[in-house]
Image (tube, rainbow, N blue to C red):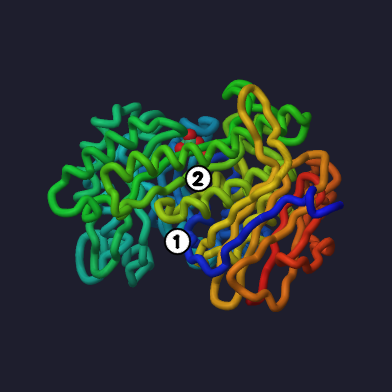
Amino acid sequence: MSDASAARVVIDLDVPGPTISRHLYGHFAEHLGRCVYDGFYVGESSELPNEGGIRLDVVEALRALNIPNLRWPGGCFADEYHWMNGIGPREDRPGMVNTNWGNVVENNHFGTHEFMALCELLGAEPYVNGNVGSGTVREMSDWVEYLTRNGDSPMVRLRKENGREDPWKVPFWGIGNEAWGCGGNLTAEAYVDLARQYATFCKNHDGNELYRIAAGASDHDLAWTEALMKSISKLGGTPRDLFQAISVHYYTVPGTWEHKGSATQFGFDDYYRTMIKAQDIDRVLTGHSTVMDAYDPERKIGLVLDEWGTWWDVEPGTNPGFLYQQNALRDALVASLHFDVFHRHAERLVMANIAQTVNVLQAMVLTDDTGLVLTPTYHVFEMNKGHHDATAVPVHVVDQQAPYALDGKQLEFLSASASVKGDKALVSVTNLDPAAAADVVLDLRGATVRAHRGRLLTAPELQAHNTAAEPEVVVPTELTDITTDARGLRVTLPPHSFATIELDL
Ligand code: AHR
Protein backbone atom coordinates (compact mmCIF):
# COMPACT_ATOMS: atom_id res chain seq x y z
CA MET A 1 0.00 0.00 0.00
CA SER A 2 1.44 3.43 -0.89
CA ASP A 3 1.93 6.24 1.62
CA ALA A 4 -0.80 8.18 -0.14
CA SER A 5 -3.37 5.64 1.00
CA ALA A 6 -2.21 5.47 4.62
CA ALA A 7 -4.04 7.40 7.30
CA ARG A 8 -1.88 9.35 9.72
CA VAL A 9 -2.25 9.57 13.48
CA VAL A 10 -0.26 12.64 14.47
CA ILE A 11 0.83 12.52 18.12
CA ASP A 12 2.57 15.41 19.89
CA LEU A 13 4.42 13.52 22.60
CA ASP A 14 5.93 16.72 24.06
CA VAL A 15 2.67 18.70 24.43
CA PRO A 16 1.25 17.73 27.84
CA GLY A 17 -2.52 17.91 28.26
CA PRO A 18 -4.64 17.06 31.30
CA THR A 19 -4.08 14.03 33.51
CA ILE A 20 -6.21 11.05 32.55
CA SER A 21 -7.57 10.15 35.97
CA ARG A 22 -7.41 6.42 36.66
CA HIS A 23 -10.99 6.90 37.88
CA LEU A 24 -12.10 7.09 34.23
CA TYR A 25 -11.63 3.31 34.39
CA GLY A 26 -14.07 2.94 37.30
CA HIS A 27 -16.69 0.23 37.82
CA PHE A 28 -20.25 -0.27 39.00
CA ALA A 29 -21.84 -3.12 40.96
CA GLU A 30 -25.58 -2.96 41.61
CA HIS A 31 -27.89 -5.34 43.43
CA LEU A 32 -29.26 -6.35 40.06
CA GLY A 33 -29.62 -9.84 38.64
CA ARG A 34 -26.43 -11.84 39.13
CA CYS A 35 -24.00 -8.97 39.61
CA VAL A 36 -23.67 -9.04 43.40
CA TYR A 37 -25.19 -12.45 44.25
CA ASP A 38 -23.52 -15.25 42.19
CA GLY A 39 -21.23 -12.65 40.63
CA PHE A 40 -19.20 -11.04 43.37
CA TYR A 41 -20.71 -12.85 46.33
CA VAL A 42 -21.53 -16.55 46.75
CA GLY A 43 -21.68 -16.82 50.53
CA GLU A 44 -19.25 -18.52 52.86
CA SER A 45 -20.80 -21.97 52.42
CA SER A 46 -20.13 -21.99 48.66
CA GLU A 47 -17.77 -24.61 47.26
CA LEU A 48 -16.16 -21.92 45.16
CA PRO A 49 -13.02 -20.45 46.72
CA ASN A 50 -14.16 -17.38 48.64
CA GLU A 51 -13.17 -15.02 51.39
CA GLY A 52 -16.09 -14.06 53.61
CA GLY A 53 -18.37 -15.16 50.77
CA ILE A 54 -16.63 -13.04 48.10
CA ARG A 55 -15.63 -15.05 45.00
CA LEU A 56 -11.88 -15.17 44.68
CA ASP A 57 -11.81 -16.08 40.98
CA VAL A 58 -13.68 -12.85 40.21
CA VAL A 59 -11.40 -10.87 42.51
CA GLU A 60 -8.30 -12.32 40.88
CA ALA A 61 -9.54 -11.53 37.36
CA LEU A 62 -10.48 -7.97 38.29
CA ARG A 63 -7.29 -7.24 40.20
CA ALA A 64 -5.47 -7.49 36.87
CA LEU A 65 -7.44 -4.43 35.72
CA ASN A 66 -6.29 -2.22 38.63
CA ILE A 67 -9.90 -1.21 39.25
CA PRO A 68 -9.65 2.31 40.70
CA ASN A 69 -13.13 2.59 42.23
CA LEU A 70 -16.33 0.61 42.58
CA ARG A 71 -19.78 2.22 42.73
CA TRP A 72 -22.43 0.46 44.85
CA PRO A 73 -25.27 -0.44 45.71
CA GLY A 74 -26.97 1.10 42.63
CA GLY A 75 -28.26 2.52 40.32
CA CYS A 76 -32.00 2.47 40.84
CA PHE A 77 -31.51 0.04 43.72
CA ALA A 78 -29.65 2.71 45.70
CA ASP A 79 -32.83 4.73 46.13
CA GLU A 80 -34.67 1.89 47.81
CA TYR A 81 -31.75 0.54 49.80
CA HIS A 82 -31.78 0.98 53.58
CA TRP A 83 -28.25 0.33 54.72
CA MET A 84 -29.13 -0.59 58.32
CA ASN A 85 -30.83 -3.72 56.97
CA GLY A 86 -27.45 -4.86 55.62
CA ILE A 87 -25.36 -4.88 58.82
CA GLY A 88 -25.11 -7.26 61.78
CA PRO A 89 -25.46 -11.05 61.78
CA ARG A 90 -26.59 -12.13 58.32
CA GLU A 91 -29.29 -14.47 59.58
CA ASP A 92 -30.94 -11.53 61.40
CA ARG A 93 -30.97 -9.16 58.45
CA PRO A 94 -34.45 -8.41 57.14
CA GLY A 95 -35.19 -9.03 53.49
CA MET A 96 -36.74 -6.66 50.99
CA VAL A 97 -38.18 -6.79 47.49
CA ASN A 98 -35.93 -5.51 44.73
CA THR A 99 -38.74 -3.78 42.83
CA ASN A 100 -36.57 -2.40 40.08
CA TRP A 101 -34.86 -5.61 39.11
CA GLY A 102 -37.09 -8.65 38.79
CA ASN A 103 -39.10 -8.22 42.02
CA VAL A 104 -36.85 -10.79 43.65
CA VAL A 105 -36.27 -10.97 47.38
CA GLU A 106 -33.03 -9.35 48.48
CA ASN A 107 -31.76 -10.97 51.68
CA ASN A 108 -29.28 -8.20 52.48
CA HIS A 109 -26.48 -10.70 53.05
CA PHE A 110 -24.17 -8.48 51.03
CA GLY A 111 -24.15 -5.17 52.89
CA THR A 112 -21.80 -2.43 54.03
CA HIS A 113 -19.11 -4.64 55.59
CA GLU A 114 -19.12 -7.05 52.66
CA PHE A 115 -18.83 -4.19 50.17
CA MET A 116 -15.92 -2.63 52.02
CA ALA A 117 -14.22 -6.04 52.21
CA LEU A 118 -14.71 -6.44 48.46
CA CYS A 119 -13.12 -3.04 47.80
CA GLU A 120 -10.18 -4.02 49.98
CA LEU A 121 -9.73 -7.30 48.10
CA LEU A 122 -9.91 -5.52 44.75
CA GLY A 123 -7.67 -2.64 45.84
CA ALA A 124 -10.47 -0.30 44.66
CA GLU A 125 -11.70 2.90 46.31
CA PRO A 126 -15.34 2.74 47.39
CA TYR A 127 -17.98 4.91 45.75
CA VAL A 128 -21.13 4.59 47.89
CA ASN A 129 -24.37 5.83 46.38
CA GLY A 130 -26.79 7.06 49.07
CA ASN A 131 -30.58 6.88 49.10
CA VAL A 132 -32.39 10.15 48.46
CA GLY A 133 -35.52 8.73 46.78
CA SER A 134 -36.92 6.76 49.72
CA GLY A 135 -34.42 7.46 52.46
CA THR A 136 -33.94 10.24 54.96
CA VAL A 137 -31.27 12.83 55.58
CA ARG A 138 -30.57 11.22 58.94
CA GLU A 139 -30.19 7.76 57.41
CA MET A 140 -27.60 9.01 54.94
CA SER A 141 -25.82 11.09 57.54
CA ASP A 142 -25.64 8.07 59.88
CA TRP A 143 -24.22 5.90 57.10
CA VAL A 144 -21.37 8.35 56.52
CA GLU A 145 -20.73 8.44 60.28
CA TYR A 146 -20.85 4.63 60.57
CA LEU A 147 -18.32 4.22 57.78
CA THR A 148 -15.86 7.01 58.38
CA ARG A 149 -15.96 8.36 61.94
CA ASN A 150 -13.23 7.69 64.45
CA GLY A 151 -13.57 8.12 68.23
CA ASP A 152 -16.86 7.68 70.02
CA SER A 153 -20.37 8.18 68.61
CA PRO A 154 -23.55 6.11 68.35
CA MET A 155 -22.71 4.96 64.82
CA VAL A 156 -19.10 4.20 65.74
CA ARG A 157 -20.30 2.03 68.62
CA LEU A 158 -22.65 0.18 66.28
CA ARG A 159 -19.85 -0.40 63.78
CA LYS A 160 -17.61 -1.76 66.50
CA GLU A 161 -20.39 -4.06 67.73
CA ASN A 162 -20.47 -5.41 64.18
CA GLY A 163 -16.80 -6.24 64.30
CA ARG A 164 -15.09 -3.28 62.68
CA GLU A 165 -12.90 -1.23 64.99
CA ASP A 166 -11.35 1.28 62.62
CA PRO A 167 -13.21 3.58 60.29
CA TRP A 168 -12.87 3.05 56.57
CA LYS A 169 -11.85 5.64 54.03
CA VAL A 170 -14.75 6.40 51.69
CA PRO A 171 -13.80 9.02 49.15
CA PHE A 172 -16.77 9.00 46.79
CA TRP A 173 -20.37 9.62 47.81
CA GLY A 174 -23.40 9.79 45.51
CA ILE A 175 -26.38 11.90 46.56
CA GLY A 176 -29.11 9.75 44.97
CA ASN A 177 -29.32 8.35 41.45
CA GLU A 178 -31.35 9.27 38.36
CA ALA A 179 -33.55 11.57 40.44
CA TRP A 180 -35.49 12.44 37.27
CA GLY A 181 -36.65 8.77 37.05
CA CYS A 182 -36.31 5.76 39.37
CA GLY A 183 -34.70 7.98 42.01
CA GLY A 184 -37.92 9.87 42.71
CA ASN A 185 -39.33 11.34 39.47
CA LEU A 186 -38.30 14.77 40.65
CA THR A 187 -37.85 17.97 38.73
CA ALA A 188 -34.28 19.22 38.60
CA GLU A 189 -35.19 22.15 40.84
CA ALA A 190 -36.85 19.92 43.45
CA TYR A 191 -33.95 17.48 43.37
CA VAL A 192 -31.20 20.06 43.75
CA ASP A 193 -32.93 21.59 46.78
CA LEU A 194 -33.05 18.15 48.37
CA ALA A 195 -29.50 17.33 47.32
CA ARG A 196 -28.20 20.49 48.97
CA GLN A 197 -29.86 19.42 52.21
CA TYR A 198 -28.57 15.84 52.03
CA ALA A 199 -25.04 16.94 51.10
CA THR A 200 -24.97 19.32 54.07
CA PHE A 201 -25.34 16.40 56.47
CA CYS A 202 -22.82 14.15 54.75
CA LYS A 203 -19.92 15.30 56.92
CA ASN A 204 -16.20 14.97 56.57
CA HIS A 205 -15.33 12.93 59.67
CA ASP A 206 -11.81 12.72 61.03
CA GLY A 207 -9.93 13.52 57.86
CA ASN A 208 -12.17 11.54 55.51
CA GLU A 209 -12.82 14.04 52.72
CA LEU A 210 -16.01 13.16 50.86
CA TYR A 211 -16.20 13.78 47.14
CA ARG A 212 -19.98 14.40 46.90
CA ILE A 213 -21.54 13.65 43.53
CA ALA A 214 -24.99 15.09 42.73
CA ALA A 215 -27.29 12.87 40.65
CA GLY A 216 -27.11 14.16 37.12
CA ALA A 217 -28.75 14.06 33.76
CA SER A 218 -29.24 11.37 31.18
CA ASP A 219 -27.96 11.66 27.62
CA HIS A 220 -28.45 15.13 26.14
CA ASP A 221 -30.59 16.59 28.97
CA LEU A 222 -28.58 19.78 29.34
CA ALA A 223 -31.45 21.52 31.14
CA TRP A 224 -30.93 19.21 34.13
CA THR A 225 -27.22 20.01 34.30
CA GLU A 226 -27.97 23.71 33.93
CA ALA A 227 -30.50 23.65 36.81
CA LEU A 228 -27.97 21.87 39.04
CA MET A 229 -25.11 24.19 38.16
CA LYS A 230 -27.27 27.29 38.55
CA SER A 231 -28.36 26.26 42.03
CA ILE A 232 -24.96 25.01 43.15
CA SER A 233 -23.20 28.14 41.98
CA LYS A 234 -25.53 30.30 44.11
CA LEU A 235 -24.41 28.55 47.29
CA GLY A 236 -22.51 30.60 49.82
CA GLY A 237 -18.78 29.93 50.06
CA THR A 238 -17.43 28.05 47.10
CA PRO A 239 -19.78 25.58 45.43
CA ARG A 240 -17.06 22.97 45.79
CA ASP A 241 -17.53 22.98 49.56
CA LEU A 242 -20.82 21.11 49.21
CA PHE A 243 -20.64 19.34 45.85
CA GLN A 244 -17.46 18.22 44.24
CA ALA A 245 -19.06 16.76 41.09
CA ILE A 246 -22.25 16.11 39.19
CA SER A 247 -22.98 12.97 37.24
CA VAL A 248 -24.38 12.04 33.85
CA HIS A 249 -25.49 8.67 32.41
CA TYR A 250 -25.20 7.56 28.81
CA TYR A 251 -25.94 4.10 27.44
CA THR A 252 -25.28 2.84 23.91
CA VAL A 253 -28.74 1.63 22.93
CA PRO A 254 -28.89 1.69 19.13
CA GLY A 255 -32.46 0.35 18.88
CA THR A 256 -35.45 1.31 20.98
CA TRP A 257 -35.83 0.48 24.70
CA GLU A 258 -38.41 -2.15 23.67
CA HIS A 259 -36.17 -3.66 20.95
CA LYS A 260 -32.58 -2.99 21.79
CA GLY A 261 -31.24 -5.80 19.62
CA SER A 262 -29.23 -8.91 20.32
CA ALA A 263 -25.71 -8.85 21.74
CA THR A 264 -24.48 -11.46 19.27
CA GLN A 265 -26.97 -11.70 16.38
CA PHE A 266 -26.62 -8.55 14.32
CA GLY A 267 -25.76 -7.31 10.84
CA PHE A 268 -23.63 -4.51 9.43
CA ASP A 269 -26.40 -1.91 9.71
CA ASP A 270 -26.87 -2.73 13.40
CA TYR A 271 -23.11 -2.45 13.84
CA TYR A 272 -22.92 0.97 12.19
CA ARG A 273 -25.90 2.21 14.19
CA THR A 274 -24.20 1.02 17.38
CA MET A 275 -20.95 2.80 16.64
CA ILE A 276 -22.70 6.01 15.61
CA LYS A 277 -24.62 5.90 18.89
CA ALA A 278 -21.43 5.14 20.83
CA GLN A 279 -19.47 8.03 19.32
CA ASP A 280 -22.29 10.37 20.40
CA ILE A 281 -20.78 10.20 23.88
CA ASP A 282 -18.46 12.94 22.60
CA ARG A 283 -21.41 15.31 21.96
CA VAL A 284 -22.96 14.37 25.29
CA LEU A 285 -19.80 15.19 27.25
CA THR A 286 -19.14 18.34 25.24
CA GLY A 287 -22.68 19.56 25.89
CA HIS A 288 -22.62 19.03 29.65
CA SER A 289 -19.07 20.38 29.96
CA THR A 290 -20.03 23.52 28.05
CA VAL A 291 -22.97 24.18 30.37
CA MET A 292 -20.71 23.59 33.38
CA ASP A 293 -18.08 25.95 31.95
CA ALA A 294 -20.62 28.77 32.00
CA TYR A 295 -21.06 28.43 35.79
CA ASP A 296 -17.68 27.01 36.73
CA PRO A 297 -15.10 28.36 34.29
CA GLU A 298 -12.23 27.21 36.49
CA ARG A 299 -13.48 23.62 36.21
CA LYS A 300 -13.52 22.92 39.92
CA ILE A 301 -16.67 20.79 39.77
CA GLY A 302 -16.03 17.42 38.16
CA LEU A 303 -18.23 15.64 35.65
CA VAL A 304 -18.75 11.97 36.51
CA LEU A 305 -20.15 9.56 33.91
CA ASP A 306 -21.11 6.99 36.50
CA GLU A 307 -23.06 4.74 34.15
CA TRP A 308 -22.10 3.93 30.56
CA GLY A 309 -21.97 0.94 28.25
CA THR A 310 -23.98 -1.14 25.81
CA TRP A 311 -27.48 -2.27 26.68
CA TRP A 312 -28.89 -5.16 24.60
CA ASP A 313 -31.89 -7.44 24.88
CA VAL A 314 -31.26 -10.00 27.61
CA GLU A 315 -29.92 -13.40 26.57
CA PRO A 316 -32.79 -15.70 25.54
CA GLY A 317 -34.19 -17.68 28.46
CA THR A 318 -32.84 -15.35 31.16
CA ASN A 319 -34.88 -13.17 33.53
CA PRO A 320 -35.72 -9.89 31.72
CA GLY A 321 -35.18 -8.04 35.00
CA PHE A 322 -31.61 -9.32 35.35
CA LEU A 323 -30.08 -7.55 32.31
CA TYR A 324 -27.74 -10.44 31.51
CA GLN A 325 -26.19 -10.05 28.06
CA GLN A 326 -23.32 -11.57 26.10
CA ASN A 327 -20.40 -9.39 25.15
CA ALA A 328 -18.95 -9.51 21.63
CA LEU A 329 -16.01 -7.92 19.83
CA ARG A 330 -18.47 -5.11 18.92
CA ASP A 331 -18.79 -4.27 22.65
CA ALA A 332 -15.01 -4.08 22.95
CA LEU A 333 -14.88 -1.52 20.13
CA VAL A 334 -17.62 0.51 21.83
CA ALA A 335 -15.40 0.57 24.93
CA SER A 336 -12.20 1.53 23.11
CA LEU A 337 -14.05 4.33 21.30
CA HIS A 338 -15.42 5.62 24.62
CA PHE A 339 -11.96 5.68 26.19
CA ASP A 340 -10.55 7.80 23.35
CA VAL A 341 -13.37 10.28 23.97
CA PHE A 342 -12.85 10.17 27.75
CA HIS A 343 -9.16 10.97 27.31
CA ARG A 344 -10.04 14.02 25.22
CA HIS A 345 -12.42 15.25 27.94
CA ALA A 346 -10.05 14.52 30.82
CA GLU A 347 -9.94 18.08 32.05
CA ARG A 348 -13.63 18.08 33.08
CA LEU A 349 -14.42 14.36 33.11
CA VAL A 350 -12.94 13.03 36.33
CA MET A 351 -14.60 9.63 36.67
CA ALA A 352 -16.51 7.07 34.61
CA ASN A 353 -18.07 3.78 35.68
CA ILE A 354 -18.94 1.06 33.23
CA ALA A 355 -22.29 -0.63 33.81
CA GLN A 356 -21.73 -3.16 35.19
CA THR A 357 -18.72 -5.19 36.26
CA VAL A 358 -20.10 -8.74 36.51
CA ASN A 359 -23.00 -10.51 34.73
CA VAL A 360 -24.98 -7.33 34.01
CA LEU A 361 -25.00 -5.20 30.82
CA GLN A 362 -21.47 -4.59 29.41
CA ALA A 363 -19.67 -6.80 31.91
CA MET A 364 -15.98 -7.57 32.37
CA VAL A 365 -16.64 -11.12 33.49
CA LEU A 366 -19.50 -13.57 33.08
CA THR A 367 -19.75 -16.21 35.76
CA ASP A 368 -21.45 -19.53 36.30
CA ASP A 369 -21.31 -21.79 39.31
CA THR A 370 -18.02 -23.33 38.22
CA GLY A 371 -15.95 -20.45 36.92
CA LEU A 372 -15.86 -17.35 34.79
CA VAL A 373 -15.22 -16.03 31.31
CA LEU A 374 -13.35 -12.82 30.51
CA THR A 375 -15.26 -10.73 27.97
CA PRO A 376 -13.75 -8.80 25.02
CA THR A 377 -14.51 -5.59 26.97
CA TYR A 378 -12.35 -6.85 29.84
CA HIS A 379 -9.39 -6.99 27.46
CA VAL A 380 -9.84 -3.36 26.39
CA PHE A 381 -9.71 -2.26 30.05
CA GLU A 382 -6.59 -4.36 30.55
CA MET A 383 -4.84 -3.16 27.38
CA ASN A 384 -5.53 0.48 28.25
CA LYS A 385 -4.22 0.28 31.84
CA GLY A 386 -1.15 2.32 30.91
CA HIS A 387 -3.38 5.41 30.53
CA HIS A 388 -4.28 5.42 34.25
CA ASP A 389 -3.05 8.74 35.72
CA ALA A 390 -0.94 9.39 32.62
CA THR A 391 -0.77 12.74 30.82
CA ALA A 392 -2.95 13.01 27.74
CA VAL A 393 -1.19 14.31 24.64
CA PRO A 394 -2.82 15.77 21.50
CA VAL A 395 -3.77 13.29 18.79
CA HIS A 396 -5.01 14.19 15.31
CA VAL A 397 -6.19 11.60 12.82
CA VAL A 398 -5.67 12.88 9.28
CA ASP A 399 -5.95 11.53 5.75
CA GLN A 400 -8.36 8.79 6.70
CA GLN A 401 -10.92 7.42 4.27
CA ALA A 402 -14.30 9.11 3.88
CA PRO A 403 -16.59 8.47 6.84
CA TYR A 404 -19.49 6.08 6.65
CA ALA A 405 -22.86 7.84 6.46
CA LEU A 406 -26.11 6.45 7.85
CA ASP A 407 -29.39 8.28 8.50
CA GLY A 408 -27.69 11.67 8.18
CA LYS A 409 -24.95 10.75 10.67
CA GLN A 410 -21.33 9.97 9.98
CA LEU A 411 -18.87 7.50 11.41
CA GLU A 412 -15.12 8.02 11.11
CA PHE A 413 -13.39 4.66 10.93
CA LEU A 414 -10.27 5.47 12.91
CA SER A 415 -10.26 6.52 16.54
CA ALA A 416 -7.12 7.10 18.61
CA SER A 417 -5.73 8.60 21.80
CA ALA A 418 -2.34 8.69 23.52
CA SER A 419 -0.73 9.48 26.84
CA VAL A 420 2.72 9.80 28.35
CA LYS A 421 3.88 8.61 31.77
CA GLY A 422 7.57 9.00 32.64
CA ASP A 423 9.64 7.47 29.87
CA LYS A 424 6.72 5.50 28.42
CA ALA A 425 3.88 6.42 26.09
CA LEU A 426 0.78 4.45 25.22
CA VAL A 427 -1.09 4.84 21.94
CA SER A 428 -4.56 3.30 21.52
CA VAL A 429 -6.00 2.95 18.01
CA THR A 430 -9.28 1.44 16.88
CA ASN A 431 -10.18 0.51 13.30
CA LEU A 432 -13.97 0.56 13.22
CA ASP A 433 -14.17 -0.45 9.58
CA PRO A 434 -15.95 -3.82 9.65
CA ALA A 435 -14.62 -4.89 6.26
CA ALA A 436 -11.24 -3.33 5.46
CA ALA A 437 -7.84 -3.25 7.12
CA ALA A 438 -6.38 0.18 7.87
CA ASP A 439 -2.84 1.12 6.99
CA VAL A 440 -1.84 3.71 9.58
CA VAL A 441 1.27 5.82 10.05
CA LEU A 442 1.84 6.86 13.65
CA ASP A 443 3.43 10.28 13.14
CA LEU A 444 5.29 10.54 16.44
CA ARG A 445 6.51 14.06 17.17
CA GLY A 446 8.44 15.63 20.00
CA ALA A 447 10.28 12.58 21.37
CA THR A 448 12.59 9.83 20.25
CA VAL A 449 11.14 6.35 20.38
CA ARG A 450 13.68 3.79 21.55
CA ALA A 451 11.49 0.70 21.40
CA HIS A 452 7.90 -0.30 20.78
CA ARG A 453 5.55 -3.19 21.51
CA GLY A 454 2.09 -3.65 20.04
CA ARG A 455 -0.96 -5.65 21.12
CA LEU A 456 -4.05 -6.43 19.09
CA LEU A 457 -7.62 -7.37 19.93
CA THR A 458 -9.71 -8.69 17.07
CA ALA A 459 -11.46 -11.80 15.74
CA PRO A 460 -12.70 -12.99 12.36
CA GLU A 461 -16.26 -11.88 13.14
CA LEU A 462 -17.68 -8.82 14.90
CA GLN A 463 -20.08 -11.16 16.67
CA ALA A 464 -17.22 -13.20 18.17
CA HIS A 465 -17.47 -13.67 21.92
CA ASN A 466 -16.08 -15.82 24.69
CA THR A 467 -17.99 -18.63 26.38
CA ALA A 468 -17.20 -21.23 29.01
CA ALA A 469 -16.76 -23.78 26.19
CA GLU A 470 -14.61 -21.40 24.12
CA PRO A 471 -13.14 -18.78 26.48
CA GLU A 472 -10.37 -17.51 24.17
CA VAL A 473 -12.12 -16.59 20.95
CA VAL A 474 -11.42 -12.89 21.55
CA VAL A 475 -8.14 -12.36 23.40
CA PRO A 476 -5.23 -9.96 22.89
CA THR A 477 -2.34 -11.12 20.70
CA GLU A 478 0.91 -9.50 19.67
CA LEU A 479 0.55 -6.84 16.97
CA THR A 480 3.13 -8.08 14.49
CA ASP A 481 2.28 -5.84 11.55
CA ILE A 482 4.29 -2.93 12.88
CA THR A 483 7.38 -1.42 11.23
CA THR A 484 9.42 1.75 11.59
CA ASP A 485 8.66 4.62 9.25
CA ALA A 486 10.34 7.95 8.51
CA ARG A 487 7.61 9.61 10.58
CA GLY A 488 7.55 7.07 13.40
CA LEU A 489 5.80 3.73 13.06
CA ARG A 490 3.57 2.09 10.54
CA VAL A 491 0.90 -0.42 11.53
CA THR A 492 -1.74 -2.36 9.70
CA LEU A 493 -4.88 -2.84 11.71
CA PRO A 494 -7.19 -5.65 10.61
CA PRO A 495 -10.89 -4.86 10.12
CA HIS A 496 -12.80 -4.28 13.38
CA SER A 497 -9.77 -4.25 15.64
CA PHE A 498 -8.31 -2.44 18.63
CA ALA A 499 -4.58 -2.04 19.18
CA THR A 500 -2.31 -0.55 21.80
CA ILE A 501 1.28 0.40 21.08
CA GLU A 502 3.56 0.99 24.01
CA LEU A 503 6.55 3.22 23.35
CA ASP A 504 9.81 3.51 25.28
CA LEU A 505 10.94 7.13 25.03
O1 AHR B 1 -27.44 -0.01 35.18
C1 AHR B 1 -28.80 -0.34 35.19
C2 AHR B 1 -29.68 0.84 35.54
O2 AHR B 1 -29.60 1.81 34.54
C3 AHR B 1 -29.35 1.59 36.80
O3 AHR B 1 -29.86 1.01 37.93
C4 AHR B 1 -30.00 2.92 36.57
O4 AHR B 1 -29.35 3.97 37.25
C5 AHR B 1 -29.96 3.07 35.06
O5 AHR B 1 -31.18 3.45 34.55
Label 2 Cα neighbours within 10 Å, binned few <14 / some 14-19 / many ≥20: many
Please state if 445 lies on the left or on the right of 121 as rendered.
Answer: right
Name the quadrant containing residue 251.
top right
Q: How far across and down, in percent of the image, does residue 290 sit?
A: 37, 41
Name the quadrant containing residue 194.
top left
Amino acid, disc 1:
Pro
Q: How far across and down, in percent of the image, does residue 256 sit?
A: 59, 22
Label 2 sits on residue: 30
Residue 241 vs residue 414, the one in the foreground = 414
The residue tagged with tag 2: helix, strand or loop?
A: loop
Residue 63 vs residue 290, the one in the foreground = 290
Point 44% across, 32% down: residue: 220
Q: Tell me, yes or no, whether the two marked residues, 1 and 2, touch with CB atoms within 8 Å.
A: no
Amino acid, disc 2:
Glu
Please state if 308 lies on the left or on the right of 478 as rendered.
Answer: left
Residue 407 vs residue 45, the one in the foreground = 407
Please state if 10 lies on the left or on the right of 294 as rendered.
Answer: right
* Res 176 visible: no
The residue at the far left in this view is: 236
Point 61% across, 38% down: residue: 310
* Res 278 visible: yes
Label 1 sits on residue: 18
Point 70% across, 78% down: residue: 450
Say whether mark 1 is within 8 Å of ligand 1.
Answer: no
Of the two numbered discs 1 and 2 on the same chain, state the one appearing first in sequence: 1
Say whether mark 2 is within 8 Å of ligand 1.
Answer: yes
| Structural distance between the alpha carbons of marks 1 and 2 | 31 Å
